[in-house]
Image: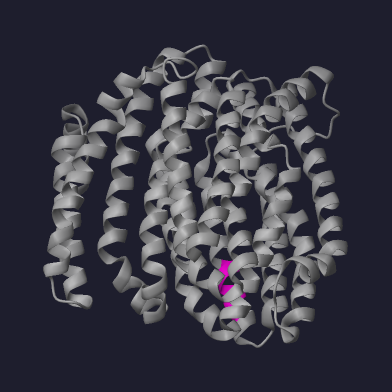
Amino acid sequence: MLLRNSLWNLTGSAVPMVVALATVPLLIHALGTEGFGIVTLVGSVIGYFGVLDVNLSAGAIKYLSEHHAADDRQRFAETFWFGIMFYGLLGMLGATAVFFGAHALVNRFFEVTPAMHDATVQAFQIGALGFALSQAQNYLLVVPQSLQRYDRSAQSEAFFGIVVNLASVAAALAGAGIAGVIAARVAVSAVNVLYLVWLIRGFDLGLAPCWPRKEVRASLTSFSAYAYLSKIASTLHQHADKLIVGAIAGPVALTFYTVPVTLAGRILGLTYRLSSVIYPRASALAGAGRINELRPVYLGVMRYVTYINLAALGVIVLAGDEFLRRWVGEEFVLKGYPVLVLMTLALLVDSLTNIPSLVNDALGHPRISGRFALANGVFGVAMVYLGTTMGGIVGAATGHLLSSAALGIGFLLFVHGRTVPITFTETLRTGFGRSLAVGALIICALLPVKWLMPAGLVGTVAIVSAALLTLTLAGLFLIVDVDERAAMMAFARRLRS
């Protein structure tokens, strides 16, 4: 079940990612570099209002998973409706703040040309409704995920992820401008909410409206209060760098920063989808008193996800310059390729903490991951600000990397053997250590070959093909255990027969 859920969760993000990356050149062409930068700013500011969210969804997944495993339908329903009421109120408060604060945001904080001023304000005001809808949409998704029905949540994410990107391009090419692009995204989000309501009704969970008891409210808010620290840090990581670059260097520089950062984040973000399914699984095991079954799952997922991350890093480093050239143009190679490499390294370091953080939270210790995440977010903002003032967009990416390395290593050393019931030594030896060593050795060996290959598409395809073949063979014989390799071979034989 864990493998199936991982693959479904990956699909739910991978398919929209491909469409999103394909539509970036069309959006830049239709909106211009400033227009695309403004759309990015609107999304970042709207996302920043997510700090109002105390991350109740994280607690909801944990307790919904536990109550479902214990077949406690009453507590399941009370937890669900508490979340609905919370995110409904949050959506209205955030939407009101964004709508009435749009003029002040544009006038005081962002340097946009006079010709784009009114359209930018309008885009913020339309985006206010999108904030309210996104809160409902994100919370409703936790229900199928808590039931470990990632097939249904992934199908929704994949379909509407494709539609929102296509609708954005259609609005831009039709001449609707930045406000039209934001309006198209809001309309798709509204339809998505209606679909999720229909989907949840089909699970027959007996979710009649009810008022949650004090003990349910207390347990959920107590857990989420600590998880809120992680939410703040996540918001800082996702949006603060763009706001800093946009405010210091302007919308044009932000476009040259956002494109490579988006590419790196989308690719390495896929592997988080592979690993995140361990959260409801660990919560269910804890609720059923079977925590001893967690160790092999934890080490296996850690080993494989780390190796996949290294493979993704290798492809980005080896082919990123040629991809940027053909995707968005030569100018993005000169200004964006160093950012792409640095941000990929930063995201790789961040990815090492994903699985330990998920298990730490699932076992009831969100205050630990929350404090480290908040420290990383605050330190990261300071480093990005310092880096941007000293070195522009390359400096911003360098700040990200330094912050991730310092806080990530500290987190790994602290939680293993404490809140995560596996020692750091065992995790390093059996989990991510072997994957890091094998993957890094292969990438370092292939880097000199890249510069010996002829420039252009043919040379890039050749070096990437060699990297994928080498990484696959090394993974099969050095990363995959003997029993797992035998099971894979047996599965392949069944497919051929």
Residue 389 placed where, x, y %? 55, 61
- As for residue 169 lying within the magenta part, the answer is yes
Give the camera-side residue of 481 and 95.
95
Q: Is residue 352 magenta?
A: no
- Give the residues in magenta: 163-170
Q: Position of residue 488 (x, y in %)?
A: 21, 38
Q: Main secondary structure of the magenta part?
A: helix
Residue 484 vs residue 118, the one in the foreground: 118
| Residue shown at 22% from the left, 45% from the top | 440
Nearer to me, 303 or 324: 324
Q: Quadrant of residue 98?
A: bottom right
Q: Is residue 322 above or below residue 396?
A: below
Instruction: Give the x, y percent position of residue 127.
Output: 75, 65
Camera-side residue of 442 and 1: 442
Tell me which residue sits at (17%, 73%) in the image: 459
Q: Is residue 411 visible?
A: yes
| Residue 354 visible at all | no
Specify the farthest residue to the front: 390
Quadrant of the frame with the N terminus: top left
Which color scheme does this rendered protein use? one colour
- The image shows residue 245 at horizontal and vertical percentages of 58, 63
Q: Is residue 438 above or below residue 430?
A: below
Q: Is residue 484 left or right of residue 321?
A: left
Residue sitting at x 13%, y 71%: 453
Q: Is residue 37 above or below residue 195?
A: below
Residue drawn at 64 percent across, 40 percent down: 231
> Would you say 392 lies left or right of 119 here?
left
- Number of numbered callouts drawn: 0
